[in-house]
Image (cartoon, helix red, strand yellow):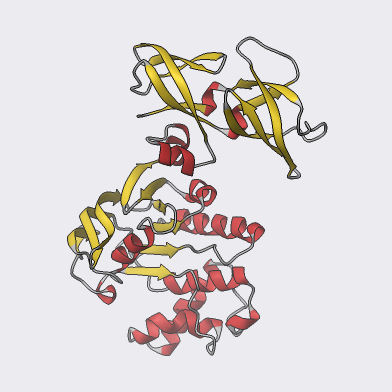
Amino acid sequence: MSRNGPASVEFRNVSKLYGGVTAVNDVSFTIEPGTLVTLLGPSGCGKTTTLRLIAGLEMATSGQIIIGGRDVTNLSASERDVSMVFQSYALFPHMSVLDNVAYGPSVSGEPKQKAHAMAREKLELVGLKGFEKRMPSELSGGQQQRVAVARALVLEPQVLLFDEPLSNLDAKLRRRVREDIRRLQRDLNLTVAYVTHDQEEALAVSDRVIVMSNAAIAQSGTPRELYEQPASLFVADFIGDSNIVPIEIESVSGDRAVALYGEARFELPSRGAKPGAAKLGLRPDAINLSAAAAPDALPGRILHAAYLGKHMEYTVLAGGAELFVVDRRVKQPLAVGDETNLTFDRDGMTVLPA
């Protein structure tokens, strides 16, 4: 896609300080060429500052930033071959869709006819052929987002950056636009860095996810690795509503541990745990509720029940803890006060490192 092909992005011990405040603290990672990597985390964790450091909109206090093998640490935004799609889209309201997209090539010195031809090509790419003469105010939120993407793509950057690109869209549109972005990234073999605080969005679009907390990287990996093997309490809790409960590790043999939670006993990957007190990450959809008692079942009582159309959400008191449970059976829901028995799917349970 890019004139030079997709580029890698590498951070080597990068920090960014604002006075005495550390926004990014000694961060190192690599985004491989042609992959989509998401920076995920709560507000204030450093993810947007990291994206702006890639763009050259912020300058690193220390460390090195390498794009496509070139040290760009001290280069301005205009000297880096990157484009950014902002949360607000930042379209010019007085310009047509075509002129918005052609703006970059025009100010770079391309003749008007060529700039418009480049813009038309990218508008067709994002599914907006025929919208060239419209003004931004005449477009839906999803269409405005596509114009912003076309404008970022028109200069064929080595790296494309997205800052919370779906936050202004409703839930249904968010799903469709994130699929559009992922398809474009794959079809055009783009290197993309993508910022969001939405875990579902990150899991859906990414080749890899970098979870940030307190200006540093908490964990980096594929969506499946982060969901199934969180490296800390923070990551387990942040990715996918995990119940964090106290357990007792009775014994460890090789890479397997026998754990006790309330009256339930089970064998799990030990993940470096030692015998004694530990924590367990328990996914809401890995908890099964049944009227019938079963071996190793844990008795519980329904404290709260909510119907969400495709599933029920319950808060269940069991094993001395309140558990959040997602149950797909909606025809005969349990009521507040009902007694139930809990069993657990092993693939939704993770011993969490101390």
Q: Please indicate whether residue 337 sits to the left or right of residue 61 in the image.
A: right
Q: Report whether residue 191 is seen.
A: no
User: At 44% from the left edge and 64% from the top edge, which residue is drawn?
Assistant: 163
Comparing 201 with 104, the one in front is: 201
* Residue 308: image location, x then y, percent: 73, 45
Splitting the image into 4 quarters, where does residue 64 fall?
Answer: bottom left
Residue 23 vertical position relative to residue 303 in the rendered view, above or below: below
Residue 32 vertical position relative to residue 173 in the rendered view, above or below: above
State the quadrant of the N terminus: bottom left
User: At 66% from the left edge and 57% from the top edge, which residue is drawn?
Assistant: 172
User: At 66% from the left edge and 25% from the top edge, which residue is drawn?
Assistant: 288
User: At 24% from the left edge and 74% from the top edge, which residue is drawn?
Assistant: 76
State the quadrant of the C terminus: top left
Q: Please indicate whether residue 2 sits to the left or right of residue 166 in the image.
A: left
* Residue 208: image location, x then y, percent: 40, 45
* Residue 268: image location, x then y, percent: 46, 18
Comparing 151 with 239, the one in front is: 239
* Residue 66: image location, x then y, percent: 22, 59
Comparing 32 with 5, the one in front is: 32
Splitting the image into 4 quarters, where does residue 336 fall?
Answer: top right
Residue 262 vertical position relative to residue 12 in the rendered view, above or below: above
Q: Report whether residue 197 is seen.
A: yes
